[in-house]
Image (cartoon, helix red, strand yellow):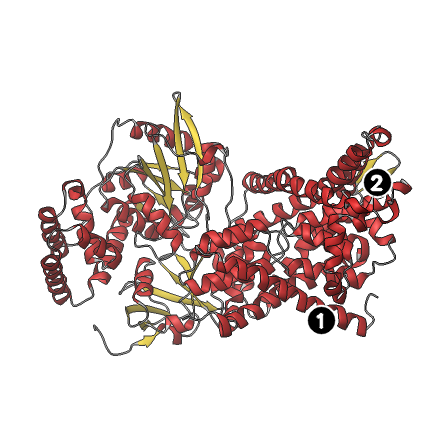
Amino acid sequence: MAYSRRASSQQPRVIIVGNPNSGKSSIFNEITGGLQEVSNYPGVTVEKKIGFFIHEEKRIRVEDLPGLYSLTPYTDEEIITRDEILSPDVSLIVNVVDSLNLERNLYLTIQIMELGKPFIIALNMTDIALKRGVIIDDKKLSQILNVPVVKTVGNKGEGIDELKTIIFSYVNNQKVLIPKHVTYGHEVDTIVEQISELLTDKLPAPEKDKTRWYAIKILEKDFKLLDEIKNKVSDSLEFGKNIEKAIQEMEQHENEDSGVIIAQRRYGFASGAIRECVTYTGEAKQNITDQIDNIICNRVAGPIILLGVISSLFYIVFKTTQEWKWIPFPNQWLSPVELFEKFFENFALLFSFFEKDYPAIHSLISDGIISGVGAVLSFIPLIFVLFFLLSALEDTGYVARIAFILDRIMRMFGLQGRSILALLISGGIGAGGCAVPGVLATRTLQERKDKIITMLVIPFMSCGAKLPVYALLIGAFFQHHRTLIMLTLWALSWIIALISAFILNRFIIRGEQTPFVLELPPYHMPVFKSVLRHAWGRTWMYIRKAGTLILAVNIIMWALIYIPLSSLGTTQNIKEHGIEYSIAGILGKTIEPITKHIGFDWKVNIALFGGMAAKEVIVGTLGTVYHMETSNTNEKDSLSVNLYRQPEWYPLRAFTLMIFVMLYAPCIATLVTIGRETGTIRIPVFSFFFSTTVAFIVSLIVFHIGHLLSLGT
Amino acid sequence: MKNPCNTERLSELEEGTKARIIGIRGGPPNYRKRLLDLGLTPGTVVKVNREAPLGDPIELELKGYFLALRRKDAWHILVEPLPNNQE
């Protein structure tokens, strides 16, 4: 990956910093022209995103950091951003400020000013502010702060060229403004000076320009930073005493906690600036978000709308991509997924000339690669439509409302309200997330206990990789109940995640519950361009994964299936039972005594082994197994038709398999991420066995109850 | 510390009530810091917009934006209720 390279010393590094929901990502996308990994998960930019732009033949590196409210970090994610802001090799900070939420956004701006380093403000979403009757005098704001202010409309690209020009002149040290000192009122300013002088004497030389900032942070009671400062100071004991005295003096004088005073004065400074540079016209107060929330968060309508949104999501996805045959094809009409299937079937025929002379190569290409990877790739339309709708939903601001509505339920099971966001990212809205960013999103949780429990239940959500498995089996056995089955799976995934969280919370991992603070961003219309870019970005990741990891695992699985154990002759000689005596077949057979209780034979077991690497492989491997079995009869039907014809397959078995796939061992990428985030091997190992055990127990219950009631048998 | 009469807990206010923040008492220090950073400083006027369908959390409006807190946590915030027509 080219973009993960470290910046060379000559290359200027620009970081984009701002409150969550300030539109940082859209500014970043416009500056870099979308030439990077795009991932705006609800409310959180979970990974550092890096891109470039070229100005006057110079390459400038730009990074988008997770949003934060303050330079006193609260979560792991904010620590990442703060460390970057303080890092000496950052050439320039671009602070994105949301015009609709000026006061709270300026609170962060003021803290950046306190650092005393030059920076630039991108005053974003000025168009919507104007519509709401809020007119911001950017020149005036720039004067007050002595910082350049560029008006931007991130999602329309307005102001981006000007921003680039200023970034360029800043990193080349032309016309650089030094931000004004923030004033906190005479009393506080005096104490800031006092502490700052105290520090000047005691700190080593390279730290001397930070004394004023340190003084403010000390008054703010950022204890973590205070400890760091104490380590750098020569005479820390006496220094500590002096500081305590100064703080006490101020607290007595103001009759308030010094941390409160600093926050209050910063907000005072912000509202002072706003008074000077903002004018309101006519109906400035009208707020549509509140009116929408009256309905969406309503006691009765809220839950109904939530259910309605999720079911229509499934409905639209399946109708447009699998059910409705609206694409013309010679002699018939096809659905988009069928069109892709047709393409791969015909593609396989191109290689039929190998069949006679090189049966092994032919089998590799046709059974291993094309029917394996092709089965995964034929779901591209489905994945794309789903991600498109999900991105649009995320952009509206509805996802935060889901967290708001469901928090009470979450809490009953010992989960943090913010865990919901992680669960939603992992596929909790529908089947279309990914557990990897979900696990990364647990960085927004403060307590380790919350993090670990959330990470352990995240894999139960239906991620995008499980979707092809569902789509395949639903297409074969539940054609007339697609939405219903998907809703059932969705509900089951939540129920099981919650019950597991409850058990983990009660009996396995202990700790206190932490406070829950969630911003509900204003609603806005999703922007077609950015939704499309996002959906395409995720679809491309799906395609790329199919062409790399899935392809590799499929080839390995094919080899395990094709290559017979030597004592039994070649697969070709014993065509009828060939697969049964391959390495994979024998592996599958060994665990058959266990899996037969949930209705799976060795063929399914083979696919489940493959699925441990990545869930999409299940479809591919089933494709390979059944394709190889039927290849001698020259039937080139799609896999779902093929499965439907098999006597050992019936709806209950398919349903149990979907549930097992939903719950069992997380994929390798997820386990690695869990390991990396927790810094221990124990948690991912536990996760592996925990998930598989839960999957087995639930499948056992479903399978046997289904049989007792003769449902789908 | 300032005006001890007529104080209430933020968690106990009715939907639609406006109140001025007096201060945050108790709760983890980190949490207090976070609330201050989000603008819940003494003197700020907040409005309890609504509660979630299951009664908890509650949604506040302050400084032109919306914030959700659980009642249990909002309990730490002392406020002085204001008559509704006043800012």
Q: Chain of mark 1?
A: A
Amino acid found under the numbered disc labelled 1: Ile
Which residue type carries mark 2?
Trp
Question: Pointer 1: residues within 10 angstroms few (<14), some, or many (20+)?
Answer: few
Residue beneath disc 1: A701
Closer to the observer: label 1 or label 2? 1
Which residue is more in the foreground, A713 or A304?
A713
Residue drawn 71% across the image and 71% down it: A701
- Badge 1 vs badge 2, beta-carbon distance below 8 Å: no
When asked about the image quadrant of residue A557, the answer is: top right
Point out which mark residue A333 bears: 2
* Quadrant (top left, top right, bottom left, bottom right) of the C terminus of chain A: bottom right
Residue under the image location 17 percent in, 40 percent down: A206
As drawn, the residue found furthest toward the front would be: A567
User: Which chain letter goes with mark 2?
Assistant: A
Residue A81 sits above or below residue A548 on the image: below
Residue A116, compared with residue A308, is above or below; it is above
Please tell me how many numbered marks the rendered image carries.
Answer: 2
Q: Is residue A518 left or right of residue A432?
A: left
Can residue A688 be seen here? The reply is: yes
Camera-nearest residue between A638 and A610:
A610
Q: Residue at x 43, y 31 (%)?
A: A52
Q: Residues within 10 Å of mark 2 (few under 14, many from 20)?
A: some
Residue A697 on image: x %, y %: 67, 69
Q: Position of residue A526 (x, y in %)?
A: 55, 46
Q: Find residue A484 and report its horizontal and vertical position in percent.
A: 73, 61
* Cα distance between the residues tagged 1 and 2: 41 Å
